Image (cartoon, rainbow, N blue to C red):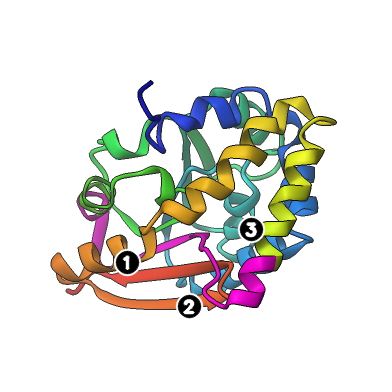
């Protein structure tokens, strides 16, 4: 039986989870998703345009809009049901728009001052995603990528593994999330996204910085396109 690639997991994870995503991501990270998003927002520069990849229901997108009320913001996601939820939240945010598109294949014909994404790196090929970002990034622009990482400390990793066992059991009560709770920890253990994206950014001459969060259970990687 063919092993599924990380990207092939996306439909299994997200086709039936849009309506509960905001609550589940907050509950299952013990509220840390909100903290991680705040750390991402701190790194978003004062600028006039932002591209938010894998924007989902718009959690990060709308926080960017609050920080940059005059900026033009485009949220892109591959799952239409998530974008439907995001569009329902638009209300007074007239400068936000959403597009259903594969981030790796994006070709908008326009450039942005900042490109952000939370949780996309583990699903994508680093080379493909960074090349796409560079094609859409203004000189001096910044790429900000965030995702889960597997903790290195043995004690923390043991607790982390135990937590996912509990989540696996919770999947019986939340069948739409069962695949996520089973497959996500495997994916996080296997991915080398932080090293792969750091190497790729440096290969293309970006100024790179990284920040580990919450006992190395997630990280933020930034790259600045030199002028």
Name above or below for residue 154 compared with residue 201: below
Start and end of the magenta stretch? 134-158
Q: Quarter of the image containing the C terminus? A: bottom left
Q: In whole angstroms, how far apart are the C-alphas of marks 3 and 1?
A: 27 Å
Q: Quick one: label 2 or label 3, which is nearer the N terminus?
A: 3
Name above or below for residue 125 compared with residue 196: above
Name above or below for residue 9 compared with residue 138: above
Q: Which residue lies under the disc numbered 2? A: 211
Q: In whole angstroms, how far apart are the C-alphas of marks 2 and 1?
A: 13 Å
Q: Does the magenta stretch include residue 153?
A: yes
Q: Quarter of the image containing the N terminus? A: top left
Q: Which residue lies under the disc numbered 3? A: 63
Query: Which mark, residue 195?
Result: 1
Residue closest to the eye, 111 or 161 = 161
Residue 136 in the image, given as x and y percentages of width and height: 26, 50
Residue 53 in the image, given as x and y percentages of width and height: 44, 46
């Amino acid at each position: 039986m063919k092993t599924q690639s990380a990207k092939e997991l996306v439909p299994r994870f997200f086709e039936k989870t849009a309506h509960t995503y905001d609550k589940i991501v907050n509950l299952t990270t013990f509220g840390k998703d909100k903290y991680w998003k705040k750390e991402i927002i701190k790194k978003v520069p004062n600028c006039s345009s932002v591209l938010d990849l894998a924007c989902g229901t718009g959690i990060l997108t709308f926080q960017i809009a609050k920080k940059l009320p005059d900026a033009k913001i485009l949220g892109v996601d591959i799952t239409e049901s998530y974008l439907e939820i995001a569009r329902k939240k638009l209300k007074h945010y007239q400068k936000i728009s959403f597009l259903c598109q594969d981030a790796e294949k994006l070709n908008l014909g326009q450039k942005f001052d900042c490109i952000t994404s939370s949780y996309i790196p583990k699903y994508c090929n680093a080379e493909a995603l960074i090349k796409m970002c560079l094609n859409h990034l203004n000189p001096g622009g910044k790429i900000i990528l965030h995702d889960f990482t597997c903790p290195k400390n043995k004690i923390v990793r043991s607790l982390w593994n135990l937590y996912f066992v509990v989540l696996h059991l919770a999947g019986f009560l939340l069948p739409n999330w069962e695949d996520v709770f089973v497959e996500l920890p495997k994916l996080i253990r296997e991915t080398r996204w932080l090293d792969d994206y750091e190497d790729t950014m440096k290969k293309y001459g970006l100024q790179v910085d990284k920040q580990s969060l919450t006992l190395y259970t997630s990280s933020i990687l930034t790259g600045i396109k030199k002028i």
